[in-house]
Image: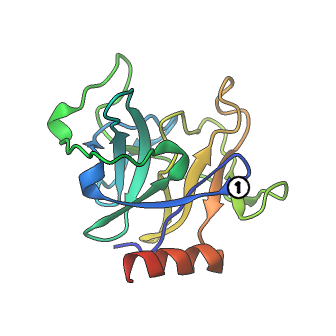
Amino acid sequence: MPNLTETVHGGYSELLLGVTANTEVALQKRVIGGDECERQYHVQLRAVYPHGPSSLCGGSLISDRWILTAAHQVQITAEAEIYTDKDTSTEPGESPSLHCAETEVVSCTDYQHWFCGPSPGKDICRGDSGGGVVHNGRIYGVSSFVGDPDFVCRAPAAFMDLCDPEYADWIRKTINP
């Protein structure tokens, strides 16, 4: 199992770890230009609100009890519902399988604690926030936002850098109190 993961939104970082009872694991992913990937580390979550809409985001399994995802995708509620894969449906043109894509990594000097993934013909979409950037079985970043939501594949996607000691320490302390 990988050791780390994390997320951000709007230029500041927000980490969120959640237990699996608060999420719905879904099968689809909308990575553009990707191929099917190993399911063992990557999941798609559905945040379900008692009196409102649900939303999709990515996530990474970091232990048998914890999923790390983007905090901007989740609203903490007093009530939690558990859903399973059987509740998943896909829209026309969407793949029923989880997709991953290889990309180069460059520094995003305009932001603190970020790196970007510019790769022609490959991109992430809305709903992919929170998914992990994995290399050799370790999670190094969390998908945070697309480069240009109106023109995919033209600007690099941005990811929170989990190698930052502040984030790595927070994750370790949270899952191992």
Q: Secondary structure at mark 1?
A: strand
Q: Residue at x 29, y 60 (%)?
A: 40
Left or right position of 141 against 53? right
Under mark 1, the amino acid is Tyr
Residue highlighted by disc 1 = 12
Q: Quadrant of the C terminus?
A: bottom left
Pick the front one: 45 or 93:
45
Left or right position of 62 against 32? left
Check the image and name the residue furthest to the front. 78
Vertical comparison of 65 with 173: above or below:
above
Q: Quadrant of the N terminus?
A: bottom left
Q: Residue at x 46, y 80 (%)?
A: 172
Vertical comparison of 60 with 1: above or below:
above
- x then y, percent, for residue 15: 54, 61
- x then y, percent, for residue 135: 50, 67
Q: Residue at x 25, y 26 (%)?
A: 89
